[in-house]
Amino acid sequence: MKQLTLAPLPYAYDALEPVISKQIMELHHDKHHAAYVNAYNAAIEKEKTRDVMRDISFNYNGAIMHDLFWQNMRPAQENNLPPEGMFADWEKIKKEFTNAAVTVEGSGWAVVWQVDGELVVGQLEKHNLLGLNGAKPVLVLDVWEHAYYPQYLNNRAAYVEAWWQVVNWEEVEKRIR
Ligand code: MN
């Protein structure tokens, strides 16, 4: 297994303000994302016991999910809607995704998966549980407390609602193709 490297953010730390603060982005990328990369790189050097395999799954998926997350955001825009035709029923998907994000138990992610050409909403607990094998994540939202707590406190719903302004739909469209 190859070592992972921590790619820099594709924009400045303050690029997503006011939706996501510079402080959150610095901590989230430089400390949390970096920790998953480093822990994965350490784990793959070890004998593959059950605990080590669990560490590999958790940290590998943690690292990859953050790469996707940074890339599927960009500076805020008002009325930031997906391209016409991306979703058959956008309002339904938005409602399901918001519900998925708000109801993750503990730490996790809301995800739009592409499964057999269809876009479906799901969740991940931690970074790696409840996944759909063979499905491709095309839009991901980190709802771990480290992603919003310093700015939104316990109001995860407000974070999710504001987050739609920074979704990079062009990137999502590229993933779907
Ligand atoms: Mn995170």
Image (cartoon, rainbow, N blue to C red):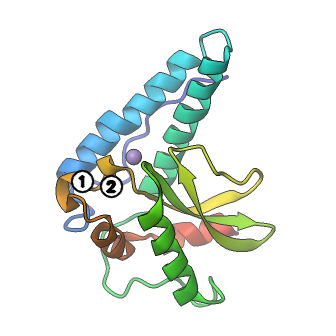
Measured in 3D between alpha carbons, the distance from the residue under mark 2 to the one under mark 1, in whole angstroms, is 22 Å
Determine whether the residue tagged by mark 1 lies in a helix, strand or loop.
Answer: helix
Counting other residues with Cα less than 10 Å from the Cα at mark 2, is it few (<14), some (14-19), or many (20 or more)? few
Indicate left or right for 124 with 21 as reference: right
What residue do we see at 51% from left, 53% from top? 68
Label 2: which secondary element: loop
Please tell me in which quadrant of the rendered image residue 177 appears: bottom right
Q: Is residue 107 above or below residue 122?
A: above
Three-letter amino acid code at the position of disc 1: Tyr
Cβ–Cβ under 8 Å for marks 2 and 1: no
Where on the picture, by quarter, is residue 31?
A: top left
Mark 1 sits near ligand 1, with its Cβ under 8 Å away:
no
N-terminal of the pair, mark 2 or mark 1, is: 2
In the image, farthest residue toward the right: 116
Which residue matches tag 2?
A: 11
Residue 107 % position (x, y): 43, 48
Q: Can residue 72 be seen here?
A: no
Q: Is residue 79 visible?
A: yes
> Picture coordinates of residue 28 (x, y %)?
31, 44
Residue at 24% across / 44% down in the picture?
26
Neighbours of disc 1 within 10 Å: few (<14), some (14-19), many (20+): some
Q: Which mark is residue 124?
A: none
Q: Which residue is mark 1?
A: 149
Residue at 47% over, 30% down: 37
Q: Which is closer to the viewer, label 2 or label 1?
A: 1
